[in-house]
Image: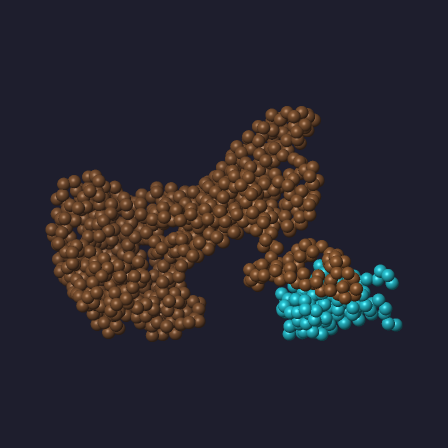
Chain colours: A cyan, B brown
Amino acid sequence: MPDAKLEMLQGTLDLLILRTLQWGAQHGHGIGQAIRVRSDDLLQLEHGSLYPALHRLRRAGLIESQWGVTENNQRARFYRLTKAGKKQLSVEESKWNLFVKTVAKILRPQE
Amino acid sequence: MWSRFRWWLRRDDEERDLDEELRAHLAIEARDRMDRGEPPERARLAARRSFGNLSHFREETRDAWGWTELERLAGDVRHGLRMLRRAPGWTATIVATLALGIGLSTAIFGVVYGVLLKPLPYPSADRLMAIWNSAPVAAYRRYNVNGVNWLTWRARAQSFEDIALARLIRNFNLTGIGEPERLQAASTSWNLFRVLQVTPLMGRVFTEKEQNGDAKVAVLSYGLWRGRFGGDPAILHRKIFLNGEPYEAIGVMRADFEYPTAQFELWTPLYLPPDELRPGLNNNYVAIGRLKPGVTVAQAQAEMSAIMRRFVDEHPQTNRIVVAASGSAGLGYIDALVEPLLTSNTLQVRAALWVLMAAVGCLLLIGALNLGSLLIARVGSRGQEIAIRAALGAGDGRLARQMLAETIPLSVAGAAGGIAVAWLLLRVFAPLFPSQIPRIETAGLNVPVLGFATGIGLLVVLLASLLPARLTSRFRISGTMQQDSRSVTGGTKARGALVVAQVTVTVVLLFAGSLFARSLEGVLRVNPGFRTDGVLTMHLAVTRAKYPRDAQVSNYYDRISDRVRALPGVIAAGFVNRLPLSGIDQTGPVEFESHLGKLIDTDWRSATPGYFEAAEIPLKRGRLFTESDTPTSPLIAVIDEQLAREVFGDRDPIGKRVRIPIADQPWTTIVGVAGHILNATPEKDIRPQIYWPESQRTQDRAALVIRTLSRPESFTAAVVEHIRKEDPDQPVYDVRTMDEWMSRTLGARDLLTWLVAFFAAASLILGCLGLYGVVSFTARARTREFGIRLALGASPIHVGRLVLDQAARLVLIGCATGLALAFPVGRAIQSLLYGVAASDAMALLIAPALLMSVAVLASLGPAWRALRIDPAAALRA
């Protein structure tokens, strides 16, 4: 499967970012990497959508940021889930699950 | 909104953070690649490449921040300013229209706010209520209360914290310090200050004990204290002489205390003599109550009505009223009326001021419509520019926002100009408003009024730019850039709608204006029934401490009359207790011996023989008063022709007897019938009149009426000098010629009429401009069409008629809707009209006729041009 990159579904990016940050604080590049790796390279984040999304989440108060240093001694901005963000994540997750289940049911109805 | 603004303030920080974050991202990416073995230079490049267009991406992120909208708006405003500078004539027209419209309406609103809306200067003033007696069956919706009312209400009403009583005419002659002066004063119940929740600046106010004991104490106004007593701090220990009696000054009120109006200078305790307390009599007072917190006016009204009802049951004889005045007969019970004090104070002027506000609002509306029309025309002429912008990718919203942004500088300039105009108008015209309007002196530019101006400015511009904004979206499709004369009709249709709306409003305004003009004409035609020219009048009040007996007072009046009559140039002089047209009445019922039980409401007057002579009130029958009518001669009366007709029809009233319908009042014999004169305003001249000789029914306040050969005002000094010769302590006040009283009586109507007429004329001009603009614009736009028509054989007359048809259609539709609206408007202002019906045919016809002729005139030019179109030239164009 040479060209099997997936189009990102609208609205799922926020969910993926929040989910990624559940494991701990991460910087923008790290978030992109994590999503790519965990999706077996199927999901490639556009940088042009990652940073606006981070900003959006930050203004919504779901994540917060702080300047820090990576293990390679590179200064970077680290993002972390806020309390509201954690709550939002669980809401989004169950919504997503319901959505997937529903779509699946329609595509492959059980006899 | 606020959080967005905070972000915007921090935008530089955010920009820096973003840049650094992106740099960090690239560094990490490059590092990763190097870790995987790529050479550093290539790793960095690859990192950069994988990232994509950095600046595009920066823009996207910034978009998410949300400042771009603001920045774009600022850019649009700058662009707008450039466009406005390029069309200075157009810009000046719009700003002038706006400034005038906003200025006029702000000035009127300044008056409306100062008089009608601004809260009274007392704590929780909205809880202050005026309480009246009310007898709607007798056409007396509100009239004064008496001591019994007050005591009953105070004892029983639960809705009020307290109720105060005041006698608003309790004026004094101030003597013993300099020039004698007449002070406007009120006597009030001790709790008035508590009800109003005010405290004196120094000293104290009077007590309940002082009120009940008729104590000679007085509270001074700040103005009187400063002006007359030089702000003497020791005033509290001084005695001042009021009506010749010593009063102790016990307090000075603060400068802003102005109950009942700013003209009042003194307050004394209101003593209610026990023999005055009789139900249904001596209605000399006004009552003010303060509602308990949370009690509504309706609740208080219900309670007061219930109290009055119970009171009627307890006193069945006195509080039943028999109505027999002016033909209407009925039976009713006296009720109470509770209304906010502010409403009560402004009763006389409320309707007129709102009419002015509505008229100026109409003018503003027409101005806004004109503005809309101008903006549309501009969109039309800029169709090409807009099409290019659209082709380059500007969205609908973007274009609409741009149109709006261009109008923002206009609205700012318009509002600023409007405030300047309003300031000027208020300075110049506020003094012209009749001084009887309460609180008129406080009308000015204050925060709410400025807020109004700004709000109106924004609103007008917003409304005016909505339509063009909608139009821009159409231009994108209209054959894009090859746009020419054929594609402007969209704008024309919208402008046509605006013109129809303008015509509608103008018709309504002209209609109202002509109704007022015809009312004024009616009022001016009113014959006052006596000769007003050549007459000087002045008031004086006798100090009763000096002249305790009635005979002394009337003798004093006679001596003054004799002295004044002796002056060269004086033809006649006499006294009457209430001057006609002065706005002060003395009214009450009379009863005729031949028609017992039939009470007729009349104007009561006490007069000396010289009064009829000086005012030239005609004698219709019998005789007038003479020197031989003395306190000891038989009691007599003179009635006016209206009263004679009402009671006796064609029969002779001479020799019949009449009296004030109270048991101990004596009968008086009618000796003559005088002509009816105008005592109050023409609108309220409803009562017949009766006169008693001053010598037999003496009153200590009187007006001296002097007929002179010419220039009556030049006699003032000589007359006052002769009065002072009789009594050096006699104050003389309210000196005016009779003509001046007459014009004051008509003054309010004058002003109302002129202002409405002015607004109507201004709207007519604006409406005509709008009409002309649209007609000529369309005609020019249709030049090619006309050329084709002419080439195909249409006669020039036919083409000219096409132009006229369009104008006529717009005006006809506008007139039809305007006339439909005129009826409800006429009914709404009915109460302000005099001698003209709200459906007056003349007024209805004037407006459409005027507009039609203007429409024809406005379209003549364009039609003439259409007639002379050269088909060949037009087609090539």
- The residue sitting at 78% across, 70% down in the picture is A38
Q: Is residue B47 left or right of residue B135?
A: right
Residue B335 in view in this figure: no
Q: Is residue B625 above or below residue B330?
A: above
- The residue sitting at 63% across, 29% down in the picture is B799
Please state, as top left, top right, bottom left or bottom right, where the C terminus of chain B lies in the image. top right
Please state, as top left, top right, bottom left or bottom right, where the N terminus of chain B lies in the image. bottom right
Judging depth in this view, the residue of B187 and B98 nearest the camera is B98
Q: x and y percent of residue B765 in the render? A: 48, 39
Q: Is residue B259 above or below residue B581?
A: below
Q: x and y percent of residue B564 in the render? A: 15, 46
Residue B721 in view in this figure: yes
Q: x and y percent of residue B100 in the render? A: 46, 44
In the picture as drawn, the residue positioned furthest to the left comes out as B725
- The residue sitting at 15% across, 45% down in the picture is B718
Q: Is residue B535 left or right of residue B723?
A: right
> Number of labelled discs?
0
Judging depth in this view, the residue of B766 and B656 nearest the camera is B766
- The residue sitting at 60% across, 25% down in the picture is B868
Q: x and y percent of residue B767 in the render? A: 51, 40
Q: Quadrant of residue A16?
A: bottom right
